[in-house]
Amino acid sequence: MQRATSRATDAAVVATIGAGKQAVGQLEAVCEVRKIREVRVYSRSAERAGGFCAALSGRLGVTMHPAASAAEAVRGADIVNVITNSATPVLEGSWLEPGQHVNAAGSNALTRRELDAAAVQRCTRIVVDAPRHRAQRVR
């Protein structure tokens, strides 16, 4: 699922929560459609976050650095990519700022939940990749 709010199309700062293989594609896609200048990466593994930044910064032509926490990564970002396999929320609605765009793409099974209920409720628009997901409710 992708959940989105709306910020101006001049978005330049991305927060990425998750630093696995799927996060690469999510970040590449954002960099393809926006002129990104900075990426902040949070992973439960600081080593993985650092490696993710080192591997992609030059290739994407953007400044990337690990963040000490997910909240730190999100603060002031224009776009927030959340791409984990977490069963418990890794993005809290209280961290979100008006107009931030959220791509929540890792919660692709009922046993996963990357966003807390407050994050979903703060969205002004929710876009899903499969019609069957429309009927699911936030608990």
Image (spheres, grey):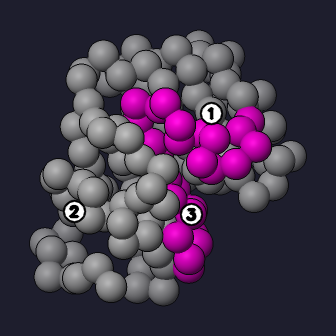
- Left or right relative to 17: residue 126: left
**124 inside magenta stretch:** no
Judging by the rendered image, the residue that carries numbered circle 1 is: 40
The x, y position of residue 18, in whole percent, is: 62, 53
The dot on residue 130 is none
- Left or right relative to 41: residue 125: left
Image position of 81 with respect to 35: above or below: below
Q: Secondary structure at mark 2?
A: loop
Q: Is residue 44 visible?
A: yes
Query: Could you tell me how far apart the alpha carbons at marks 2 and 3 are, in whole angstroms?
Result: 19 Å
Q: Is residue 28 visible?
A: no
**Amino acid type of the residue that numbered disc 2 sits on in the rendered structure:** Val
The x, y position of residue 79, in whole percent, is: 41, 36
Q: Along the line of sight, which residue is nearer the eye, 100 or 19?
A: 100
- Magenta range is 66-91
Judging by the rendered image, the residue that carries numbered circle 2 is: 128
**90 inside magenta stretch:** yes
Residue drawn 27% across and 57% down? 122
Residue drawn 49% across and 67% down? 114
- Mark 2 is surrounded, within 10 Å at the Cα level, by few (under 14), some (14 to 19) or many (20 or more) other residues, namely some
Tell me which label, 2 or 3, sits earlier in the chain.
Answer: 3
Judging by the rendered image, the residue that carries numbered circle 3 is: 90
- Mark 3 is surrounded, within 10 Å at the Cα level, by few (under 14), some (14 to 19) or many (20 or more) other residues, namely some
Query: Could you tell me how far apart the alpha carbons at marks 1 and 3 are, in whole angstroms?
Result: 15 Å
**Amino acid type of the residue that numbered disc 1 sits on in the rendered structure:** Arg
- Left or right relative to 6: residue 79: right
Query: Could you tell me how far apart the alpha carbons at marks 2 and 1 are, in whole angstroms?
Result: 25 Å
Q: Along the line of sight, which residue is nearer the eye, 2 or 139?
A: 139
Q: Quadrant of the C terminus?
A: bottom left
Q: Along the line of sight, which residue is nearer the eye, 115 or 103?
A: 115
Residue drawn 67% across and 25% down? 64
